[in-house]
Each structure stands twice: as structure tokens, then as C-alpha cells.
Image: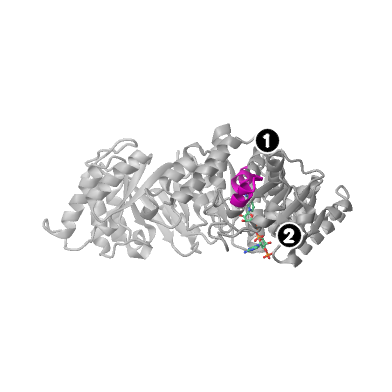
Amino acid sequence: MTLVCVPILFDDPESAAREAIEARDAGADLVELRVDRYFSGRGGDEPQGECHQQAERIAQLVARCPLPCIVTCRPVLEGGHYDGPDDARIALMERLGASAGGVAPAHGGAGRAPSYIDVELATFLRSENVRQKVRLAVDHPGQVRAVTTGLILSSHDFHERPPDLLRRLEAMNREPATRVMKIAFRARSLRDNLELLDLLAQSRGAGGAIKPLIALAMGPYGLMSRVLAPKFGAFLTFASLRRDSATAPGQPIIGELLNLYRFGAIGSATRVYGVVGWPVEHSLSPAVHNAGFEAIGHDGVYLPMPVAPGYEPFKATVLELAEHVHLDLSGLSVTIPHKEHLARLAHQQRTGWGDRWSLDRLTELCGAGNTLVIRRDPKGRPKGLAVHNTDGAGLVGVVRGAGVEPAGAEALVLGAGGMARAAAAALALEGARVWVLNRTPERAEALCADIARAAAALPEIGSAIAQRVLPIGRHELAARAPGIVVQCTPLGMAGGPDPGGSPLGAPELAGLPDRALVVETVYRPARTPLLDLARQRGLRTVDGSALFVAQAAEQFRLWTDRAAPSRLFDRVVRESLDADVAGP
Ligand code: NAP
């Protein structure tokens, strides 16, 4: 079982004691008492000296800690706050180990000694004198005293993967006093997680090839190493009590780890899903899909997966993650700016690798995909990688759900970006005649020409579709009287270029048929100026969150072969959007 450890970096032992209770109540298994901001190491060991008094109060804090604890006095050089002499902090560790008098702090109950002390490998290797003192303070095969505290040897790099990572690990593993090894470095991409996960797998179980391990990637790319720790048998993962109390970049908060990512339910067979985009930290998809997996009992976890803009980072990341046989990557949502990259990758791979990759008709037609479904063989190798576009499929779903049949309808698509392409292609495939109106008319023309070209290359679709996706000028709108309007620009979007704007004004809406349906794709906020105007005109409307839910539900069905709990999805999305409005 992988433990959840809450780090508590404190100036005052009283506040640390309160936070330890909070950590226990939040579901932590242990706490790390980070004494390095409190313990100065100065003033010698005179009974009245500062250092002695501080050590005494730390020992009292450990004794009354409601959870087993790790004590760490991290020096500035490894990202901590301690800048006193090494001797003093090693003496503190000796004192804490010895103060136990051999009382074992079993998991689940408080003890009088720390369960572990954490000492950096660099410190440990510095001198034989340090090594001897640390060995005296911890339990190990050569220990003659009644000591229960275990040694965590650790190594941190806040910039990148250290070139000698494996040598550091070997040194930790070789030391007989090491009970747990810890390596942490800043990830430069999602791919950096994979090496750490592989190392964790080697440490798994009683007969692991190496000692128990904590392996963490720091920074925004590292969440995967933290959340998937139980899948790969890590000794523990860290989670902070609050966003502002994280002790390392990228540390999740404990509520998210346990409730959003359902850490306790993650095991070796858990399948991994995620949303690839840039940025992805505000995506609603993790909340939606994780809640859905829980509701239907699907053994899966869904993570935000940031991938920097550009085709090359996207290609390298997706291929490496998909090919990793132990990660069990089973599905991806792909969002801005990578939807076109997904279609391109599938085309490229299909040519090079036979028929493992496939694209659905809509992705072929609009040149962008937002969903990857990965089927694996019993050895974990990907045997089928299918790209879909559920933005388009979801749109058709909400249009039909509103009682409007696309076949034979006149539809107006506003915008000529990725969403507009998916909407135009999906409605045309269903038999609608689609008019595309865009701020820059040339881009609307290019959209129509691209769809016509793609359709001509697909014998099963045929060139007739070219006649059904056409650019339009604003002055022609009234003559076309579209019964379906799909708004695919960021107008009205909170934080967008024009939050108060609407692509159609009241006079243009007045010219639409009375039974026209207006579909908004913007979902932040739930009410946009266009929706307000359309409702004032008495038209039927579908808001952006309904479309979001529909496209997510289709992804969920493709990944799990089960119908999505759409009502739950809808509730999760609306609650998240309400929370946005309420603020933190
Ligand atoms: P995109 O590729 O950036 O395209 C944006 C389009 O909007 C372009 O055609 C652009 O016109 C037009 N536009 C931008 N600013 C404008 C302005 N101030 N006035 C008039 N037109 C403007 O974006 P996208 O990926 O298609 O996304 C479009 C919208 O769809 C976004 O708001 C997104 O949130 C929403 N969306 C929703 C869902 C969902 O599930 N609900 C899914 C996907 C997308 P030019 O060509 O002239 O630049």
C-alpha cells in the first residue's frame, strides 16, 4: 500500500501540531515534519542554548504527533531552509532516534520516535563521521541499540533529471542502513515521469530488485508520478494540506489526491487516461471522467497532461506514453492546441505502421481529432489506436436531443477554427447544408475548401458533401434562414477577446425562423450574450456545458464501452462552473 504523507513546514511547533491533526483528519497516513525553518542549529548544545531548546520542542512535537512521522531538516542546498552547521542537525536526528527508548511507532498509532528521518544522500556521503552518526540514530541490520527509526536517504534536483540519477540510486540502495530511498527531480516533460515509474516498479513488493522507493517528478509535468505512485508500488506520495502549503512544485493537495483522483482505488491494473493540451490545469475533464469511472466501477484514473505547443512535443509524448507497456494508457482527450496534431499523427503513423492506427470519418473530414482510444494486448502493447472527433459527434447529439433533425436542415456555423471545422463536417455528414460565417472570410472559404478536398479523397463519403459546406456573407443570412446556428468563436467567453460580444446581434436573430435552434459552444460562463439574445427572441438554445457533456460522454463510451452517466457529468460540470463564478 502506498502511503499518503502530508509535509508540514513550520516556524512554530504549535501550528505544526495543529496541522498534523488536520492532516490526519484529511486522510493522511503520515506527516513529514519539516523542521528546517524552525530549527536554527545555532547556540551549541548548552541546556539553555537555542539549539537545545528547539530540539526539545521538536522531540515533544514528535511524541504528541497524531500520525507516524518523518523528520526532515532540509538544507538550503537541497531546496530547504536550514543554513546552520551539519553537525547540529545530525545531532538533532541522533537525539530524536535515541529519545524513543525503542518505542515503535506502528502505522496508525502515534509513537515517541520518528518513524523515519530523511537525510540527503549528498550529506550522508560527505564524511565517515556523518555516516557513523546517522547510522547510530537509525535501525539497520548492524544496529546494537533499541532504535526503531528508519532512514530515508534522499536526493533532489530542482532543475532537471540529474545525469547521475542511477548512480545516486545505487549508492542509496547499497547503504545497509537505508530503509527507503527517495529521488525527486524537476520534470521537463511528461516523458520524465516514465523513468521514475519504471524505477518504482523495480522496487515493488517484498522481493523488489531494489529497496522501497519514493520517486517524484516535480513541477507541472510531474503529477503523473505522484498520482500513479500506487500503481507502481511507491512507498509513499506527498500531498499538501492546502495549495499554499506545498513543499515542492507540483505537489497535489490531499483533497484532490484522495477525492478527485481516487488515490485509494489506484492499483497495478488501473488504466490511465488524460487530457493532453496547453494549458490544461483548468480543464473540467478530470472532474468529469474520474467521477464517471467511479460511478460505473471502471478501474481507471484520468489526469491533466500538459504538452507544450508544437507538433514535435505532441508526437514524441503521445507515442512514448502510448507505447509504454506498464503505464496502461488507454485513452486521451486532446484539446487546444493539439487537435490537428492528433489527426496528423494518426495519418503519419498509419502510413508507417500498418493498420494499428485509424481515424473516424469525422476526423478525416475536418482534419482534427479530440479523442484517442488505445486497445492493448495482454502484454500491455498497444494493438489499436483509434482517433475520433467527439466535438462533432457531441454536437449532432445535442442538436438531435433538442428535437432538431440535421438531415435536410440549413445550418449556420459561426467561426472557422477547430470547433467550427468539426461542427461543419459533422452536420454535413448528417445531411445538413452548412453555411460558414467568419470574421475573416478567407478562413471560412479555406474551411469549406479543405472539407471538400478531404471528402473527395474518401470514397465512402463522396464529393457531394462539397456542395453542402459553403461560405456565406453576413448580408445573405436572412435569405438562408438557418434552422440550426452553432456559435464557434470565443465571443462571450470569460477571459476571451470579447466577453461581452455576440457574433449575431438582435436584428440578425430576428431574421431567423421562429423554431431555430442556437447552440453555444462557449461554456465559461454558462450564460453568454448570444444565449441571452436568442432567448429574448424566443429561440430554442443549448448552452456550451451541454455540448461539453455530450462530447465527454461520447469519449467515455468509446473508452469504457459503457454509456456515460450523463446526468452526473452534467452535475459535475455545472458545479465546477458555479465554483468558478464563486471564486476560490
Ligand atoms: P479557434 O480555432 O481559435 O477559432 C476561433 C474562431 O473564432 C476563428 O474563426 C476566429 O476568427 C473567431 N474569432 C476569434 N475572435 C473573434 C472575435 N473577436 N470576433 C469574431 N470572431 C472571432 O477556436 P476553437 O478551438 O474553434 O474554439 C472556438 C470556441 O469553441 C471556443 O470558445 C471554445 O471554448 C469552444 N469549444 C467548446 C467545446 C465544448 O465542448 N463546449 C469544445 C471545443 C471548443 P478568425 O478566423 O477571423 O481569426
Quadrant where the N terminus lies?
Answer: top left
Residue 396 on the magenta segment: no
Residue identifier under label 2 = 437
Q: What residue lies at 37% left-to-right and 62% top-to-bottom?
A: 79
Residue 532 on the magenta segment: yes
Provide the secondary structure element on which disc 2 rests. strand
Where ligand 1 lies, by quadrant?
A: bottom right
Q: Is residue 196 above or below residue 86?
A: above
Q: Is residue 159 left or right of residue 316?
A: left
Circle on res. 125: none
Asked whether 95 or 72 is in front, the reply is 72
Q: Is residue 554 visible?
A: yes
Mark 1 and mark 2 residues within 8 Å of each other at the beta carbon: no
Q: Estimate the x, y position of residue 268 in percent, counting from the top left.
A: 55, 39
Range shown magenta: 531-549
In space, the residues marked 1 and 2 are separated at their CA atoms by 37 Å
Is label 1 or label 2 in front?
2
Provide the secondary structure element on which disc 1 rests. loop
Circle on res. 561: 1
Q: Amino acid at mark 1?
A: Asp
Q: Is residue 71 above or below residue 27?
A: below
Which of the two labelled residues, at mark 1 and mark 2, occupies the earlier sequence position?
2
Asked whether 499 or 208 is in front, the reply is 499
Q: Estimate the x, y position of residue 530 in percent, counting from the top left.
A: 62, 53
Q: Amino acid at mark 2?
A: Leu
